[in-house]
Image (cartoon, grey):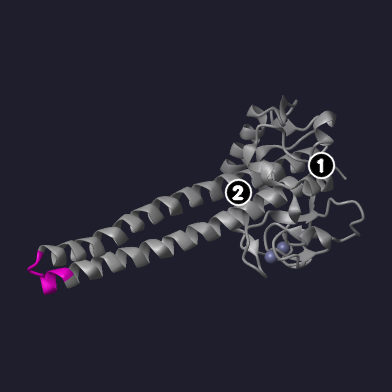
Amino acid sequence: MATSTCPACGANAFVAAASAGASEGDGQCSRCGYTSGESSRCPHCDAVARLEGAGLTAVCAMCGGPRVPANLGGDVARSALREQKKALANARAASIATVLQGGFSTLATLLGLALLPASLAGKLVVFALAIVPLVLAMRSRGRARAARESAARAGERAWQAAAEEAAARREGGVTAAELAKTLGVEAEHADKLLTALTVSDRTRIDVGDDAQVRYSVGPERLLRVGEASPAGDELDDEATPAEHEGRVR
Ligand SMILES: [Zn+2]
Ligand SMILES: [Zn+2]
């Protein structure tokens, strides 16, 4: 997909809006985040807001939720980003709980050492006060790690959907370098995204006369861009029937 000159930063990184009904000039710069039009509507807070940061760390300037440039990837990316935001919030909450519970356990241990109760019952109380929060802290830490991993998986799904749409929108497919520029990510990550799409049969590879590897989306796949991802993606099944209807529209 072609990029044009960004009216804000002047870089050739402005991605025109894809949605039908988008007017001329609607789009988003993958470099500075300059924003105009519906393609910049945040999937989290619903505001037309620019991106803060670029690439994988790009977040909505209004609500701080993770986003992809120009809302590429349609509804698949949108729901994956929402899932990512939720998982990130869970991870943060679990991390805070880990610190608090760990701190309480340390405090109880110090208190127990200071008081050193003589009776067995007293010792048991001190032991329980120290060990229970410690167990809870360890559980919270595991929960935080799981939430971070699930956030990373959801983010990866969103970026794959964005890469798929970028490949579909460019006639003849994209190279990893072109995709990197469009999405504002490292070439290495663009390569990884395209490889993942090819492995799951969502893009195909052609080597052109210029010996460049191009990834493209066939016409049969084009229809599916923006719809629910193929069956087997169990994490996507959280969408309500109404949402599924919305995707096919
Ligand atoms: Zn710009
Ligand atoms: Zn937002």
Q: Quadrant of the N terminus?
A: top right
Q: From which residue to which does the magenta span run?
A: 112-119
- Magenta-span inclusion, residue 127: no
Residue at the location (35% across, 57% down)? 136
**Which badge, 2 or 1, is on the more N-terminal residue?**
2
Helix, strand or loop at label 2? It is helix
- Dots 2 and 1: beta carbons under 8 Å? no
Tell me where residue 169 appears, x and y as whole percent: 81, 41
Asked if residue 184 shows in the view, the reply is no
Disc marking residue 169: 1
Q: Amino acid at mark 2?
A: Gly
Helix, strand or loop at label 1? It is helix
For discs 2 and 1, the disc positioned in front in the rendered view: 2
Q: Amino acid at mark 1?
A: Arg
For label 1, count other residues whose C-alpha is less than 10 Å away and answer few (under 14), some (14-19) or many (20+).
some
Residue at the location (66% across, 55% down)? 82
Residue with the mark numbered 2 = 155
Asked if residue 122 shows in the view, the reply is yes
